[in-house]
Amino acid sequence: MKNNRRFLAISVLSLAVAGLMNAQGQETMGDLRAVLDAQKGKSVIDIPKGTYTLDLKNNIGPYVFSNLKDVTVEGNGSTIICNYQKQAFSIDHCENFTIKDLVIDYDPPCSTQGTVVAMTDDAKTLEVEMHEGFPLPDPETEQDRVHFYDGETMELIWNLYANQITEPIEYLSDRKIRVKLAMPKPNTYGVGDYIVLNNIPNTYVGHMIISNYCKNLTFSNVTAYDSPQFFFGEHYCENSHYYRCVIDRRRNDPKYPIDQLRAGIADGIHSKHATIGPTIEECTIQYITDDPVAINGNFYPVCDVDEDYQQIYILARDYNLTDVTIKQDENIVAVSNGGVRRGEGKPNRVRLSTTPTTDEINKCLSYFNDIKDRRYVNKVVVRFSEEEWEKIGDVQPGDVLFSTNRIGAGFKVINNTIGHIPGRGILIKSSNGKIQNNKISNTGAGAIIIAPEFNWMEAGLSTDLEISGNTIETCFWKQNHNRSQCAAISVVLEASNGDLGDAGGFRNISIHRNTIKDCPKPCVFLNAIDGGYFYKNTIEPATWERDHGSSFLISNKQEYVTKNVANIITDEDPLGIDFPEVEEVNEDAVLIDSSGRVSLKGHEGQKVRMEIYKVSGELMSEESFMNTSAASVSHLKPGAYVLHLTCGGEAFSRKYLVD
């Protein structure tokens, strides 16, 4: 019986693949679902090289991979065409699951485009001739992201983030339409330029691939040219790996005499609530409409505090307790409405409370500026032991809680190519991570942004980050937007009440050996950091000016600007710390060998006392030695440190960075 089932599976697979070749031996379309279904239960699911249709019409849902372990989907360079603009794949509760060597595209596309052939003087009403091969825009689609591209360079037009169409589109003859922009901007775009509009249903469409509760998930050499929302969206995952994936607009497609201008509708790789953050490595993400890389968790607004029972009531958008990221016995941070860390502790009980009333929701959210999503459906009670209650601090309504265990800590964003987008490049709200050796160019807003966003309730407050070796060029060309995220590299805590946070919201942020070229001043803005390193960065600012941070009195006359920071080592002030026992003296005498062992030049055979400090002044370790230290400094956690040595009444010190 077992052999018969195997024969049946092979027969179904053969029939599905047989449709790939017609009588002339030319490639035709095959049914992807049949190929995948025929191999259920196998550890290697093999897709013979070809072009396949993934049928998503008539309310057919995404193809689901569920509860699989140690399974690899071998794409063999195949192309998958989704025939409707909605979610393609769902990957749920899988472990050690890999998808590799695939191309994913949509037909019909998720965007459509045309050339501006006429325009009124006020730049509001445009006549557009749609490009051959692209569909007329769907009149039911909400055009919330209309983008303009230069008719010659095919690059995004500067000084314009996006526009909107709120009035009905008029359909003219010969594939021409008339549109009226909600936010016209004269002298920015004109006749001969290109406009790109959404082409997705006005119902829920989902992301291209959604991964939920997966562990050790890998996407390797997956190329995607289009998506109805995010390309890769992951929730509650652990240790995902995106390796050599490509998200880009498609070129030289014979269907389109004028190349595709925009890839997808929203973010590239967006990770939420990861217990161990993703590694995003050697990927290319460009020509999309929103953040190429985003890693974050959730803030939960505090609506009530019961001191007698040592419990805090928070609002949640989650329908069940499983999805709430505040967990029993996991570390929780309380953040005040002014952006100050009140404290952190571990609850001994988390449970659902009563359903919040509209009045309760409105009262709680009244503490916050510009809330983007008010769809709160549950109230959760978070209870603490007496000892942990003292640690969490004096929490008040209008504060927020977040979990340090579920913000994607431990992430790596390394060796990627990112750019040609209207918004930000890399947006991080996580901790214990690396942003290294990326090439980021032509972003309308900042290239690397470290910032919680309370208006989206996206956590958290970052600690122990290294931002190094990145090359950033021609970023922040959009029009002035008067936001706190005002520089190519911005580390900024804009609190719930709209003020810039005090030092201590962020901790131990190391920024070194980055190159920033042709970006407006300020090229770097640092805020709310206590303990860090800004050293050996090369900045060649643009000659053109912007005034992005004017609402926060952030100068655009300096390359490097700080507000409310403490204990940051810089080139100009190499130590810049307050503890008196460390002074920068005799730095060249402190030697560190390839294994991280420390010695003192010229003092061999003498007793040496060594202390290692964080830049915040915290003593990490101390020891005495005669020739070489017993401990290796390379085993310290990533960050900036000061080595302080004394010998025979002399003092020596040296900065040391652990990558």
Image (spheres, rainbow, N blue to C red):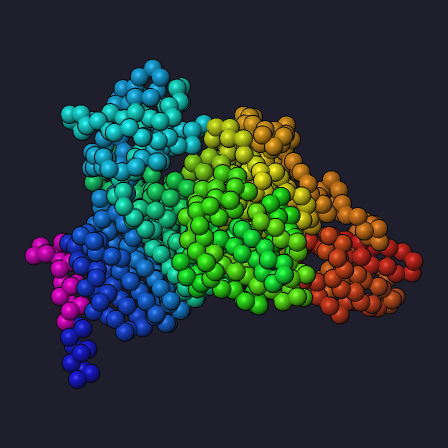
- Quadrant in which the N terminus appears: bottom left
Query: Residue placed at 40% from the left, 22% from the top?
Result: 185
- Quadrant in which the C terminus appears: bottom right
As drawn, the residue found furthest toward the bottom would be: 1
Q: Nearer the viewer, residue 166 or 255?
A: 166
Q: Position of residue 30 (x, y in %)?
A: 17, 58
Query: Residue placed at 24% from the left, 29% from the top?
Result: 169
Query: Residue placed at 37% from the left, 72% from the top?
Result: 70
The image shows residue 182, relative to residue 29, as above or below, that is above
Q: Position of residue 283 (x, y in %)?
A: 43, 51
Instruction: Report whether residue 408 is seen.
Output: no
> In the picture, residue 648 is in which quadrant?
bottom right
Q: Is residue 393 left or right of residue 77?
A: right
The image shows residue 440, relative to residue 102, as above or below, that is above
Query: Residue placed at 27% from the left, 33% from the top?
Result: 113
Q: Nearer the viewer, residue 115 or 110?
A: 110
The image shows residue 557, relative to residue 590, as above or below, that is above
- Residue 131 lies in magenta, yes or no? no
Q: Position of residue 141 (x, y in %)?
A: 27, 38
> In the picture, residue 50 is in which quadrant?
bottom left
Q: Nearer the viewer, residue 376 or 85?
A: 376
Magenta stretch: give its range. Answer: 11-27
Q: Position of residue 211 (x, y in %)?
A: 37, 59
- Residue 17 lies in magenta, yes or no? yes
Q: Nearer the viewer, residue 251 or 464?
A: 464
Instruction: Report whether residue 501 is seen.
Output: yes
Number of callouts: 0
As drawn, the residue found furthest toward the right would be: 649
As drawn, the residue found furthest toward the top would be: 121
Q: Is residue 118 left or right of residue 172?
A: right
